[in-house]
Amino acid sequence: MDDDKQLAPAKRSRLKHEAGSRAARRSVIGFLTWLAGWLDRIDPGTHRRIKGLRLVTAYGIAAMLGALPEIGHGLGGGASLSVMAGGFALWASVSEGRSTRAESSRDLLLLCAAAALGAAVFILLRPVLTGVGQAGSELSLATGAFLVGYLKLFGILGAGIGSQIFIGQLLAYGAGLTFADLGMVGVAAAIATLAAVVPRVLSGPAERPPVAAATASIGGRAGLSPEFVAGLQAAISTLVIVALNDMIGLAESAWAITACAYVVTSSPTGTIERVRRRIMGTAVGVPLGLLCLPIAVDAPLLIWAAAAVAMIIYAMALPDRYDIACGAYAFTLVVTLAVTGEHSIWLLAARAWETLLGGLLGLAAAMLLAPLQTARRGRPPDGR
């Protein structure tokens, strides 16, 4: 009898544990069911999910190849090869939007070359601009910001090339590249091309790029195209950010420049909407990323897996839900910075207010130059 009394608490504990395990399994199954339904609503044909997997794969292949000592040995700036190659491949895969393997492969080659060109332009301009104040080397980013808007004039490939030139400049600026690193930039472009083309060839007809519907847009006055005006707005916003960085110092001015470059469209109303969505998404993504900081050191593999899932969501949401896409990328940026050794909450949280600053400056530039534009219909909306 005494033995039964002693066993009773152990039995109750075991039964309680089993009940808790069943409840946890039901919760996980319920969450996975909800997630599958949500994915089907956003991406009913799974095409964007496949693209998301492709761009994550391209980044992983490029970063892995760039980290191999046999490839980086003897290259100036070899320590940055993995970052450069991964960035080139990732954003080339994001910008590419063709329906056939041949066209996609051609565009990926051109997009990776454009990123290398942007990095080379930054490297060549850096010695000239370094003496112009504390943030002088950032001035070259104004050219890339201009091209992000202006090259949309030449369609999807032009928009991608403009974006890639800017991305190349940003990566070179972040890595602090110099003239000795030009060879490394070329190798990074070659690695990125291989890493981006192979997954695209394998994905084949499973991808179906979205078709942009015609919508109200903006025409230019005084002989200026709307794309030229959009590029001018982004460039002016960039120059203001560079000046602010020189005067007061910003935590990560490149984040503010990126925000203003990508929120500006050929329409003031379109710019307002993109600013709103980018700020909303970033305001959600950054805190979610900060919540993951405690496990960034102890579980880096889990963090990288979460970042990969976030980038797949980014690819799925980008065409229709810019706010979700911005939130997913903000989360990815924060957690990947944390897992690679950046643990300053002040710096990581700066992503939010730098985005706010860049978005508001882009909006102010759009309002300032609005008299250069007039209503026109029938043009497709800005893509990215």
Image (spheres, rainbow, N blue to C red):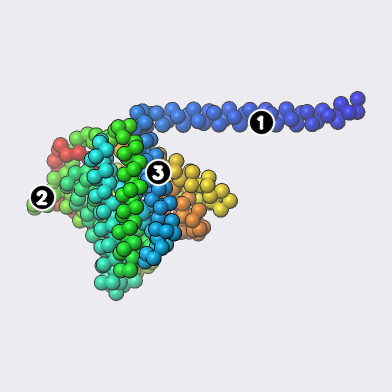
Determine the CA span between mark 2 and mark 1: 67 Å
Give the residue at the far right of this rendering: 1
Task: Give the amino acid at mark 3.
Answer: Thr
Residue 12 in view, yes or no: yes
Q: Residue at point 17% right, 52% down?
A: 228
Q: Position of residue 379 (x, y in %)?
A: 17, 39
Quarter of the figure that contains the N terminus: top right
Q: Which residue is mark 3?
A: 57
Q: Residue at point 40% right, 48% down?
A: 61
User: Who comes first in sequence, dot 2 or dot 1?
Assistant: 1
Q: Position of residue 326 (x, y in %)?
A: 37, 45
Asked if the residue under mark 1 is in contact with the one under mark 2, i.e. CB atoms within 8 Å, the reply is no
Determine the CA span between mark 3 and mark 1: 37 Å
Give the residue at the far bottom of this rendering: 131
Asked if the residue under mark 2 is in contact with the one under mark 3, i.e. CB atoms within 8 Å, the reply is no
Q: Nearer the viewer, mark 3 or mark 1?
A: 3
Q: Which mark is residue 221?
A: 2
Using the image, determine if residue 154 lies above or below residue 341: above
Q: Position of residue 280 (x, y in %)?
A: 38, 45
Q: Nearer the viewer, residue 195 or 216?
A: 195
Q: Residue at point 27% right, 46% down?
A: 108
What element does badge 1 sit on? Answer: helix
User: Who comes first in sequence, dot 3 or dot 2?
Assistant: 3
Residue 275 in view, yes or no: no
What element does badge 3 sit on? Answer: helix
Res 132 → quadrant: bottom left
Q: Nearer the viewer, residue 45 or 202?
A: 202
Determine the CA span between mark 3 and mark 2: 44 Å
Give the residue at the far left of this rendering: 223
